[in-house]
Amino acid sequence: MSVITLADPDAERARLKAVSTEGYGDECGAFDAAMRTYMMRTFEPWFRDGKALQVGCAHGDQTSLLLQRYTDLTVVEGAREFIDFTRRRVGDQVTFVEGLVEDFETDDRYEAIFFSHVLEHVVDPVACLSKLGDLLTPTGRLYVVVPNAEAASRRIAVKMGALTHLEDLSASDIAAGHRRVYRLDTLCRDNLAAGLKLEDTGGIFFKPLANFQFDALIGGPLISEDFMEGCYLLGKEQPAMAASIYVVATRG
């Protein structure tokens, strides 16, 4: 298994703790929660039975959905606050490991590894992808999801002057601890550099509004379930303007 050495692991843990307590609210917003459901729908055709690993659980929305599909689920999470929150939601159905993905060591191999909205946080994304690839079974798949630099909402923000360019980090990116923002080509590049083979790539949910705007409007007369479904379907056709982009990868 790949070994990753952080220059200052204690500083990274302190940074993660600060982000978990200051950069996130007490629970997942309505838009982020909906996105977890759309991720599962996107990946469903690729699922196989077996052990699953989730790297980063945040408030447990995706963890809850994964438990509907996988009976053997391990979660690696560096923030104790997120583990405690998610454990209150799911009980003892999950094996929790407190620690950074860079520190995670196991003899287990997984049929499915979920790396959702974490790659943009880590110090060395290629090294982390390589390490997770080593943890796959010969038939296992790694599901990587990141926010999209080219989302329609970010394009609008650039035109407004709120961002200087599409890969600029917004105030909300910085508060959430993001170190970078990906386009689909740069996401594919890092997966390939990690020695992974790409089975599928694409976008999830066409995103014309910022997260806080969706959070304020979801459930009201302006953002109906039909509108959300339309945005999900359009995101499959227009990945360059989707909220999130993804890669389904296997061992190279």
Image (spheres, grey):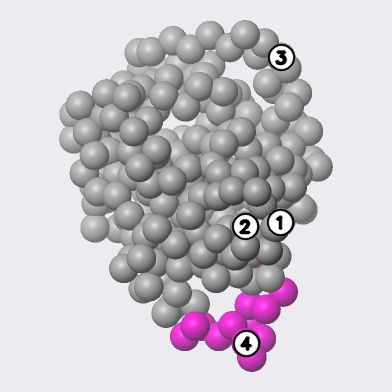
Q: Classify residue 246 as left or right of residue 169.
A: left
Which residue in the protein does label 3 denote? 10
Marks 2 and 3, how far apart at CA:
36 Å
Callout 2: 10 Å neighbours few (<14), some, many (20+)?
some
Distance from the alpha carbon under mark 4 to that under mark 3: 45 Å
Q: Which residue is mark 1?
A: 162
- Seen in the picture, residue 149 relative to 74 is either above or below; the reply is below
> SS class of the residue under badge 1?
loop
- Mark nearest the camera among 4 and 3 is 4
The residue shown at (64%, 71%) is: 214
- Decide which of tag 3 and tag 1 comes sooner along the chain: 3
Query: Mark 2 belongs to which amino acid?
Result: Val
Label 4 neighbour load within 10 Å: few <14, some 14-19, many 20+: few
Dot 4: element: loop
Label 4 sits on residue: 222
- Of tags 3 and 1, the one toward the viewer is 1
Residue 51 appears in the picture as rendered:
no
The residue positioned 59% from the left and 83% from the top of the image is 223
Image coordinates of residue 230 in percent, x first then y, are 42, 79
Quarter holding residue 239 = bottom left
Disc sitting over residue 158 in the figure: 2
In the image, the segment drawn in magenta is: 215-227
Mark 3 lies on a secondary structure that is: helix
Please tell me which of labels 2 and 3 falls first in the chain: 3
Which comes sooner in the sequence, label 4 or label 3? 3
> Within 10 Å of the Cα at label 3, are there few (<14), some (14-19), or many (20+) other Cα atoms?
few
Kindly identify the amino acid type of the residue bearing the numbered disc 3.
Answer: Asp
Q: Residue 109 placed where, x, y %?
A: 31, 26
